[in-house]
Amino acid sequence: MAQKKHPILTVLVILCVVALFLGITMVIVLKIVSPSSNLSFGDKIGVIPINGAISQSIDITTELVRLKKDSGIKAIILRINSPGGSVGPTQEIYREVRKTIQTKKVVVSMGSVAASGGYYIAAGADKIVANPGTITGSIGVIMHFVRLEELLNKIGIDLEILKSGEFKDIGSPNRELTEREKELLNALITDIQRQFEEGVAEGRNLPLEKVRQIADGRIFSGSRAKELGLVDVLGNFQDAVEIAKNLAGIKGDVTLVYPEKDKMDLWDLVFESAAGSVSKLIQGMKSRVEYRWGGFAQHRVKESY
């Protein structure tokens, strides 16, 4: 009887192996045809989300370079939902956008907010699409200083600073700025503002004087921005996709390729949230110069996809 059972066991093993093979094959096929997969076939458009305050540039510039080199990617869409941020990272992303448009079309799709540094980046693209109610513009520079001298005096803390030059501790929180320091900082802001204005004028092919007339930090609706030449088309993300297809000469459907998401477990998410809150608190106390709109929307501009 035992010998008669062997053929049955053999058949069961074979069936299990076949089922396992089919399951693995199915997973691979689903992965390949997934809209977010880089392995999908047909025409593809890369999408790079830029969400929240701009504090670093490496992720975005690296993704731009990767998509630029990928022969399967026919165009790139930047989905911007940001009030701006630090000057250096903003300029680095803008520069990479300007280099990218030399070989591939780049279209910007503005979300609820694409202001200050968010607009600076957008200005470097081939086309800008905004919703009529998008908050944009805010072409300007802002510098923050925290003043703590009264608090330190109340709790009996004094700071003693040794420095190699008169202006080495400029912006120190334990004292007011001197008039000479304010002059120096205003000169710095003027220089960085000029760079912003020239970047917009170059990217949008606008006269520099026209940009300067509206570069006083004011914000605009997407509709008003279009009238001023800061935006090309009023529309949503899907309209941006159609424009990118037309610019790249794509007919029919396309696959949108997003950056790979990092997988995190529950503890990673909790730690990231806590670390982010502490980081924001610390950053809020630092002196900094930014291309950033400080309005109400800056705390809720993150999108997911």
Image: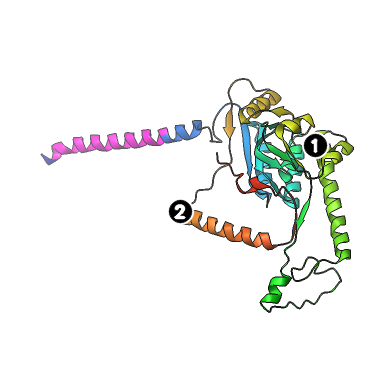
Compute the Cα span from label 1 to label 2.
Answer: 42 Å
Say the numbered circle drawn on residue 266: 2
Percent position (x, y) of residue 72? Answer: 63, 31
Percent position (x, y) of residue 253? Answer: 58, 23
Q: Is residue 53 left or right of residue 195?
A: left
Numbered-mark total: 2
Percent position (x, y) of residue 21? Answer: 37, 35
Relative vertical location of residue 71 with respect to residue 250 in this rendering, above or below? below
Give the labeled residue for mark 1.
Answer: 203
Q: Quadrant of the N terminus?
A: top left
Q: SS class of the residue under badge 2? A: helix
Q: Is residue 168 left or right of residue 83?
A: right
Relative vertical location of residue 271 with respect to residue 208 in this rendering, above or below? below
Whether residue 124 can be seen here:
no
Span of residues in magenta: 3-26
Between discs 1 and 2, the one toward the N terminus = 1
* Observer-nearest of 51 and 225: 225
Q: Is residue 149 left or right of residue 210?
A: left
